[in-house]
Amino acid sequence: MCTVSFIRRDEGCFITSNRDEHISRPLAHRPEEETLGGIKVLFPKDPRAGGTWFALNELGAVAVLLNGAFVNHKRQLPYAKSRGLILLEVISSRQPGKMLQEMNLEQIEPFTLVLFEDEKLLEFRWDGEVKHVKPLNSEQDYIWSSVTLYDADAIHQRNTLFNRFIEGTREISAQKIVDFHSNNHSDYENGFIIDRTTGLKTFSVTQVVLNSDNNKMRHFDLLNDQAYHVAFSPKQLTPIK
């Protein structure tokens, strides 16, 4: 929920996320399928609030969460609901983008949500007062870093590393992207794998691979050195008129 990349190639889409948390927070459960609102959703569950930062539904839509919107905000507790539960409400809808833009976010902590739905890529930011909706070109490559953990200089450096990876990698694959996300790049404070003296660590790397035949979620638990791979074939439903 603190680093997200979107990469599109002929063989499909790769959406990858690093989850950075304090060591006091419990580990997420392995990715499992649940039926929410009549829609099957695959996601790793956060045991604290029951939400998630990364989910894929049976229609092939993917939603990924980052903490914060544009700047590192000051928390104003209590909040009405966790952002991870908001993500599940969105991804369990047949029209996630429409629901996201219409739902009431009053008393919800600021967040950024990357949504890929029906071949369309959307960047949505909630700053605590206003919704900011930005359609993106799904044929391009993108990276996001959470503003609650990384300042402007760190984000710029991470963007530079990402661009070097894209430009310097002859044939980009799912595994090469995971390897890039799993590298601290000699910087345990602001690299892609962090291990800060404050107790903040990178817990996991999660990736969804989307193609016309089969969708797959790969989840790498870095603290326990375990990997989970779950296939999730897309389902076609009758379009809403």
Image (cartoon, grey):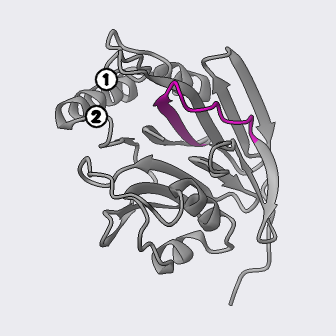
Between marks 2 and 1, how big is the CA–CA gap? 7 Å
- 158 over 80 or under it: above or below: above
- For residue 104, say whether it is visible: yes
Three-letter amino acid code at the position of disc 2:
Tyr
Residue highlighted by disc 1: 190
- Of mark 2 and mark 1, the one earlier in the sequence is 2
Q: Quadrant of residue 44?
A: top right
In front: 38, or 148? 148
What numbered label is drawn on residue 143?
Answer: none
Q: Which residue is at 48% across, 31% downward?
A: 21
Which residue range is magenta in the image? 13-31
Judge the density around disc 2: few (<14), some (14-19), many (≥20) Cα neighbours within 10 Å: some
Q: Position of residue 92 (x, y in %)?
A: 69, 66
Q: Are marks 2 and 1 in contact (CB under 8 Å)?
A: yes
Q: Residue under circle 2?
A: 150
Magenta span has 120?
no
Residue at 41% from the left image edge and 74% from the top image edge: 106
- Residue reaching furthest to the left: 153
- Residue 126 vs residue 163, the one in the foreground: 126
